[in-house]
Amino acid sequence: MNRRQFLAATSASLLASVGCRHRLGVAAAPRLFFTSDGRTAVIRADGSDLRYFDFQLPGQATWQPGPFLSDGRVIFLSMEPRRDGPGRPFEEFYTQTPTHLWLHDLDRGTLTEIANRERLAVFYTPALLLGDERILVQVVRNKVGQIFSMNLDGTDAREFTRAGEGLPYGLSLSPDRHRVAFHLASPQGYQIWTSDLEGRDRIQVAAHPDHLYFGTSWSPDGRWILYQDCQFKADPGHDWSDLCVGRPDGSEHRVLTSGHSQWFAATYGNSQLRGGGSNMPMWTRDGSILFSRRSPGAKVPWEYQAQRPDTDHFNRDYQPDAARGGTQLCRLNPATGAVTELTPLREGTWECRAAESPDGRLIVFCQAQTGEMPALWVMNSDGSDPRLLTRGQNDRGADHPRWVP
């Protein structure tokens, strides 16, 4: 189990939700979460009501939102000061950092700790909400991670995956709420699986030792699972990938793009301020796919250094003079392969993290120029009328947007 697997797993599930309020009889713009300079904020799609969360609980160093209950309350993950650092290897000490799960009401401001009964380990992270009463949680004991299903208070914990078979993350729930899809970082490689809600009745959707299959999301009709394919031996920094879909019963695997056209490991910033994280394609309500398409021969300014050990889960050098090309946002029809450009392709402009609003009217996305941190933008679903929402706290970047349905 390595640094990339752990940190991707603990940051992989920003979801959102809560109803709208009204101004003068007109529905207010929908809300969304984003992160900036290590903090989480909520903002409306018209740029109003910006608020950064500050729970001010002693001993908690970082906070990030996870899944939402049906009544709009959100599960937050907090982490105490990390136990790894200089002289304390990540692999041994990171998962010795105590974490806590909390239930927060966005409108009332209440905060209640959950998953605190019958704790199995100090390191818990929320993986997937199965309903308002039960959750899948990643638990790490003795440097071994696995998924447990438990009540929200932490009781009645049951093994969903087994210790030693690999680190499972990238979980998603089928529209009928009967099946779970996930990727398993196994000794045989990153594989795509489905199972029932207890982790049984497993079906392998995609697996190959030369391919890193990553992330899962179900199509709106539940007939396909979307995931990425990175050929990691030729691309150790995981910069690029192709988009794939597979049948939940394992009967079909299709590659939708070619040339590793999707920007996978999004990185940005400069030598003083930098950031990144896995960039995931997203379904739209009509069954299309939003993704970040690169220009031919595009090269990011942050070059991955495969020849040296990864000590910071970044392991890149800033080489802006060597950068070329950029990425644009596109809509892909998985049935026909037709691609519609939503934003223009511009030299030195890097766009990622597109997500359609719950009502299908808007798309939020991040845009960064070479050497800059990303800003948060919103546009109409056809790509028209793009407008800047925020450049983040003190203009230090805005990232990882998620809509509040």
Image (cartoon, rainbow, N blue to C red):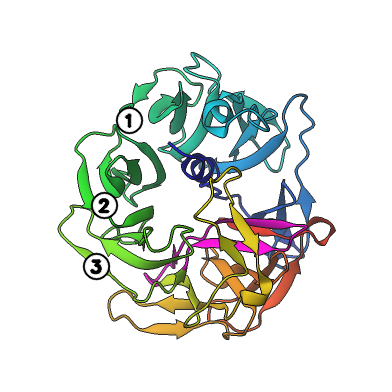
Identity of the residue drawn at 45% across and 38% down: 129
Segment colored magenta: 263-288
- The residues bearing labels 1 and 3 have C-alpha atoms spaced at a distance of 28 Å
Identity of the residue drawn at 31% across and 61% down: 221
Magenta region includes residue 281 = yes
Q: Nearer the viewer, residue 70 or 376?
A: 376
Q: Nearer the viewer, mark 2 or mark 3?
A: 2
Q: Nearer the viewer, mark 1 or mark 3?
A: 3
Q: Furthest-right residue in view?
A: 394
Counting from the top left corner in percent of width and height, residue 56 is at: 80, 31
Q: Is residue 214 visible?
A: yes
- The residues bearing labels 2 and 3 have C-alpha atoms spaced at a distance of 17 Å
Kind of element beneath mark 1:
loop
Q: Relative to 292, is 211 above or below? A: above
Q: Which residue is mark 1?
A: 160
Q: Which residue is mark 3?
A: 254
Pointer 2 with pointer 3, Cβ within 8 A: no
- The residues bearing labels 1 and 2 have C-alpha atoms spaced at a distance of 24 Å
Circle 3: residue type: Arg
Q: Name which of mark 1 and mark 2 comes first in the sequence.
A: 1
Q: Name which of mark 2 and mark 3 comes first in the sequence.
A: 2
Q: Which residue is mark 2?
A: 209
Identity of the residue drawn at 47% across and 34% down: 132
Circle 2: residue type: Pro
